[in-house]
Amino acid sequence: MLKLKTLCLGVLVALGGLSAAHADTLKEVRERGVVRCGVTTGFAGFSAPDSQGNWKGLDIDVCRAVAAAVFGDAAKFKEESLNSQQRFTALQSGVVDLLARNTTVTQQRDTALGVIHAGINFYDGQGFLVPKKLGVKSAKELNGASVCMQQGTTNENTMADWARTNGIKYKPVVFDQFNEVVGAFASGRCDVFTTDASGLASIRISRLENPDDYVVLPEIISKEPLGPFVRQGDDAWLNVVKWSLQAMVLAEELGVNSENVDDMLASANPDIRRLLGVTEGAGKNLGLDERWAYNIVKQVGNYGESFERNVGQNSPLKIQRGLNALWTEGGLMYALPVR
């Protein structure tokens, strides 16, 4: 018992030390001149390099928005490619300032890892991808199937809980690396691929040789609210990341986009004037320039622009807005007021 208490105390001291060592991330980022952003090892539409090696995606736009807010330059971020097992350790230890890689917000992650989420940039849910040749129409027909999934994600526990609840037996085929899971499924080593529905859409279009040979089943078996994470104990940095994302959503609500933002500087709407820094105060509250949100919208765009460009109708994925539509259009995207 004494050894256990000593070990627990050591862990708490270590976590406290990490928090203290990175308690002024905004200052560190400014001195360094770049935001270090933890991203995936490659997830089309969310965070992946293009043919020129430039990282793009919905999550990358969070990195760009924070860089625009802090430096007035959305290009001042450095992507750090992390797999599921590396992501939280990299954030906890200060290897990255911000984690923006399709990470589900859970109670355990927000309370026990020394990290905390800074918002939701995509509402998702776990689903199933199968070859059409199996003739499966519903996930409840998967009894006895082999299921590919990635280790260290919420998908493992969610799959186990769902199968137990529905009386379905399955054979898990688990890999450490996402690319290994994709390769195993593509080669026929398992019957089913399970992960977030957005990931299934990305895999089907960008990673499988004949996308039309596969179908995403209709069932969504979990809630997967995805968003950026920062370290606990640094509220100033949490505010910068949180409000950078909020600014993108609010800009869409107010009809402000990358094309009309300069004209909107002359708007009489007090909400627009506060957001764009014409009426000063919001920037000072964050320790940023008053044009912090203007720079985000001008260089990155509002949330709707980012969504459509990366994963929506203007992208190969063509994901419907659904829950990610504005609250005024039946979705869950609801910006907190800048005032």
Image (cartoon, helix red, strand yellow):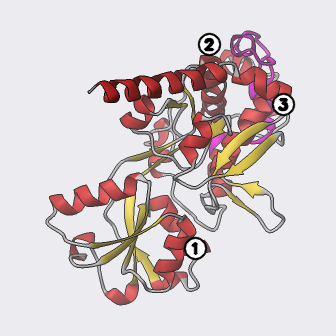
Can you give x and y, in whole percent of width and height, for residue 229 in the image? 56, 36
Answer yes or no: do the residues labelled 3 and 2 have beta carbons within 8 Å? Answer: no
Question: Residue 143 or 260: which is nearer the viewer?
Answer: 143
From the viewer's perspective, tell me whether residue 25 is left or right of residue 307.
Answer: right
Task: Work out whether 138 lies above or below 303.
Answer: below
Q: Residues within 10 Å of mark 1 (few under 14, many from 20)?
A: some
Q: Residues within 10 Å of mark 3 (few under 14, many from 20)?
A: few
Q: Nearer the viewer, mark 1 or mark 3?
A: 3
Q: Which residue is mark 2?
A: 339
Can you give x and y, in whole percent of width and height, for residue 74 in the image? 81, 39
Q: Nearer the viewer, mark 3 or mark 2?
A: 3
Q: Quadrant of the N terminus?
A: top left
Q: Amino acid at mark 2?
A: Arg
Q: Which residue is mark 1?
A: 205
Q: Amino acid at mark 3?
A: Arg
Q: Report the magenta residues as a range.
A: 275-303
Mark 1 and mark 3: Cα distance apart in space = 38 Å
The stretch drawn in magenta includes residue 128: no
